[in-house]
Amino acid sequence: LRLASELLERFVKQDAEANKSAVLTAAERYFSRLTLGTFDRLLVEATGPEKYHLQVQRHGAQGEAVPISGLSDGTRDQLYLALRLASLEQLLDRQHHLPPLVVDDILVNFDDARAQATLSCLAELGKRTQILCFTHHRHLLDLARAAVPADQLAIVSMPEA
Protein backbone atom coordinates (compact mmCIF):
# COMPACT_ATOMS: atom_id res chain seq x y z
CA LEU A 1 0.00 0.00 0.00
CA ARG A 2 2.88 2.34 0.73
CA LEU A 3 4.36 1.64 -2.73
CA ALA A 4 0.97 2.17 -4.33
CA SER A 5 0.57 5.45 -2.43
CA GLU A 6 4.01 6.65 -3.50
CA LEU A 7 3.35 5.64 -7.12
CA LEU A 8 -0.01 7.34 -7.00
CA GLU A 9 1.47 10.56 -5.61
CA ARG A 10 4.25 10.55 -8.21
CA PHE A 11 1.89 9.96 -11.12
CA VAL A 12 -0.63 12.50 -9.85
CA LYS A 13 2.17 15.06 -9.69
CA GLN A 14 3.42 14.04 -13.13
CA ASP A 15 -0.10 14.32 -14.50
CA ALA A 16 -0.64 17.78 -13.11
CA GLU A 17 2.66 18.92 -14.59
CA ALA A 18 2.20 17.38 -18.01
CA ASN A 19 -1.55 17.74 -18.37
CA LYS A 20 -2.35 14.03 -18.71
CA SER A 21 0.49 11.55 -18.62
CA ALA A 22 0.48 8.35 -20.63
CA VAL A 23 0.45 6.40 -17.36
CA LEU A 24 -2.66 8.14 -16.04
CA THR A 25 -4.38 7.78 -19.41
CA ALA A 26 -3.66 4.05 -19.38
CA ALA A 27 -4.65 3.82 -15.70
CA GLU A 28 -7.97 5.46 -16.54
CA ARG A 29 -8.57 2.84 -19.24
CA TYR A 30 -7.66 -0.03 -16.90
CA PHE A 31 -9.70 1.39 -14.03
CA SER A 32 -12.77 1.65 -16.24
CA ARG A 33 -12.34 -1.98 -17.32
CA LEU A 34 -11.64 -3.26 -13.80
CA THR A 35 -14.73 -1.48 -12.44
CA LEU A 36 -16.89 -2.63 -15.37
CA GLY A 37 -17.36 0.97 -16.49
CA THR A 38 -18.60 2.27 -13.14
CA PHE A 39 -15.74 4.78 -13.09
CA ASP A 40 -14.25 6.18 -16.26
CA ARG A 41 -12.06 9.15 -15.33
CA LEU A 42 -9.25 10.03 -12.98
CA LEU A 43 -9.37 13.65 -11.87
CA VAL A 44 -6.25 15.44 -10.65
CA GLU A 45 -6.43 18.71 -8.77
CA ALA A 46 -3.53 20.81 -7.49
CA THR A 47 -4.20 21.68 -3.85
CA GLY A 48 -1.02 23.62 -3.23
CA PRO A 49 2.65 23.69 -4.16
CA GLU A 50 3.76 20.09 -4.72
CA LYS A 51 0.37 18.85 -3.45
CA TYR A 52 -2.15 17.06 -5.61
CA HIS A 53 -5.46 15.38 -4.99
CA LEU A 54 -6.77 12.44 -7.01
CA GLN A 55 -10.44 11.62 -7.36
CA VAL A 56 -12.28 9.22 -9.61
CA GLN A 57 -15.36 10.09 -11.60
CA ARG A 58 -18.38 7.87 -11.99
CA HIS A 59 -19.31 7.01 -15.57
CA GLY A 60 -20.99 9.68 -17.64
CA ALA A 61 -20.57 13.39 -18.27
CA GLN A 62 -22.46 14.29 -15.10
CA GLY A 63 -20.80 11.57 -13.03
CA GLU A 64 -19.91 12.53 -9.50
CA ALA A 65 -16.30 12.87 -8.40
CA VAL A 66 -15.46 10.48 -5.59
CA PRO A 67 -12.40 10.87 -3.35
CA ILE A 68 -10.25 7.79 -2.89
CA SER A 69 -11.31 7.68 0.76
CA GLY A 70 -14.91 7.30 -0.46
CA LEU A 71 -14.18 4.12 -2.42
CA SER A 72 -14.79 0.62 -1.15
CA ASP A 73 -11.74 -1.51 -0.34
CA GLY A 74 -12.23 -3.47 -3.57
CA THR A 75 -12.57 -0.38 -5.77
CA ARG A 76 -9.55 1.22 -4.09
CA ASP A 77 -7.58 -1.99 -4.78
CA GLN A 78 -8.73 -1.80 -8.41
CA LEU A 79 -7.49 1.78 -8.67
CA TYR A 80 -4.06 0.86 -7.31
CA LEU A 81 -3.93 -2.17 -9.61
CA ALA A 82 -4.90 0.01 -12.59
CA LEU A 83 -2.00 2.34 -11.76
CA ARG A 84 0.35 -0.61 -11.43
CA LEU A 85 -0.75 -2.17 -14.73
CA ALA A 86 -0.51 1.18 -16.51
CA SER A 87 3.03 1.65 -15.16
CA LEU A 88 3.99 -1.83 -16.31
CA GLU A 89 2.50 -1.18 -19.75
CA GLN A 90 4.56 1.99 -20.09
CA LEU A 91 7.73 0.17 -19.03
CA LEU A 92 7.03 -2.58 -21.56
CA ASP A 93 6.66 0.06 -24.27
CA ARG A 94 10.23 1.18 -23.52
CA GLN A 95 11.84 -2.20 -22.77
CA HIS A 96 11.41 -5.62 -24.30
CA HIS A 97 12.10 -7.69 -21.24
CA LEU A 98 11.03 -7.19 -17.66
CA PRO A 99 10.93 -9.57 -14.72
CA PRO A 100 7.56 -11.25 -14.18
CA LEU A 101 4.74 -9.40 -12.51
CA VAL A 102 3.94 -11.33 -9.34
CA VAL A 103 0.61 -10.75 -7.60
CA ASP A 104 -0.74 -12.50 -4.53
CA ASP A 105 -4.47 -12.60 -3.80
CA ILE A 106 -5.14 -9.29 -5.56
CA LEU A 107 -8.73 -10.36 -6.25
CA VAL A 108 -9.68 -10.99 -2.64
CA ASN A 109 -11.87 -7.84 -2.38
CA PHE A 110 -13.35 -8.12 -5.89
CA ASP A 111 -16.73 -9.55 -6.80
CA ASP A 112 -16.68 -12.29 -9.45
CA ALA A 113 -17.51 -9.99 -12.37
CA ARG A 114 -14.70 -7.56 -11.52
CA ALA A 115 -12.32 -10.44 -10.79
CA GLN A 116 -13.02 -11.87 -14.23
CA ALA A 117 -12.50 -8.45 -15.87
CA THR A 118 -9.19 -8.17 -14.00
CA LEU A 119 -8.10 -11.63 -15.12
CA SER A 120 -8.91 -10.64 -18.70
CA CYS A 121 -6.73 -7.51 -18.39
CA LEU A 122 -3.92 -9.61 -16.92
CA ALA A 123 -4.24 -12.07 -19.81
CA GLU A 124 -3.84 -9.26 -22.34
CA LEU A 125 -0.80 -7.89 -20.54
CA GLY A 126 0.43 -11.48 -20.19
CA LYS A 127 0.99 -11.56 -23.95
CA ARG A 128 3.83 -9.08 -23.37
CA THR A 129 5.32 -10.29 -20.08
CA GLN A 130 4.98 -13.17 -17.66
CA ILE A 131 2.39 -12.75 -14.93
CA LEU A 132 2.24 -15.01 -11.89
CA CYS A 133 -0.94 -14.91 -9.81
CA PHE A 134 -1.10 -16.62 -6.45
CA THR A 135 -4.31 -17.34 -4.60
CA HIS A 136 -5.83 -19.79 -2.19
CA HIS A 137 -9.37 -19.10 -3.40
CA ARG A 138 -10.32 -22.09 -5.55
CA HIS A 139 -13.38 -20.42 -7.11
CA LEU A 140 -11.01 -18.04 -8.90
CA LEU A 141 -9.69 -20.95 -10.98
CA ASP A 142 -13.03 -21.20 -12.82
CA LEU A 143 -13.01 -17.46 -13.40
CA ALA A 144 -9.46 -17.68 -14.75
CA ARG A 145 -10.41 -20.53 -17.07
CA ALA A 146 -13.25 -18.39 -18.45
CA ALA A 147 -11.23 -15.17 -18.79
CA VAL A 148 -7.79 -16.38 -19.90
CA PRO A 149 -7.13 -18.24 -23.16
CA ALA A 150 -6.10 -21.84 -22.46
CA ASP A 151 -2.72 -21.40 -24.19
CA GLN A 152 -1.89 -18.59 -21.73
CA LEU A 153 -3.06 -20.27 -18.56
CA ALA A 154 -1.09 -22.71 -16.43
CA ILE A 155 -2.62 -23.69 -13.12
CA VAL A 156 -0.39 -25.25 -10.49
CA SER A 157 -2.13 -26.45 -7.36
CA MET A 158 -0.49 -27.33 -4.11
CA PRO A 159 -1.62 -30.64 -2.61
CA GLU A 160 -4.10 -30.16 0.19
CA ALA A 161 -2.73 -30.82 3.64
Image: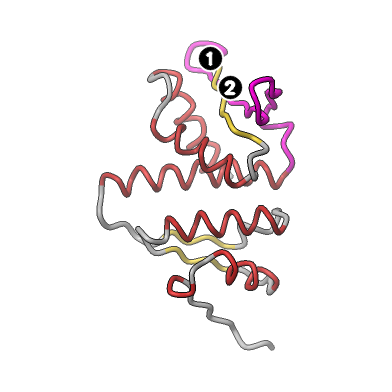
Question: Would you say 101 lies left or right of 105 here?
Answer: left
- Residue 14 is situated, as x and y percent measured from the top left of the image, at 41, 25
> Regarding mark 2 in the picture, which secondary structure is present there?
strand
What are the residue bounds of the magenta stretch?
46-72
Question: Would you say 54 lies left or right of 17 here?
Answer: right
Residue under label 2? 53
Relative to 90, is 143 above or below? below
Residue nearer the viewer, 125 or 5: 125
Name the residue: 59% across, 84% down.
158
Name the residue: 63% across, 29% down.
56
Question: Would you say 158 lies left or right of 161 here?
Answer: left
- Residue 120 is situated, as x and y percent measured from the top left of the image, at 53, 58
Q: Give the amino acid at mark 1.
A: Ala
> Regarding mark 1 in the picture, which secondary structure is present there?
strand
Name the residue: 51% across, 39% down.
29
Local crowd size for mark 1, using a 10 Å CA cut-off: few (<14), some (14–19), many (≥20)? some
So how many labels did they put on this image? 2
- Residue 63 is situated, as x and y percent measured from the top left of the image, at 69, 24
Instruction: Identify the image quadrant of residue 55.
Output: top right
Residue under label 1? 46
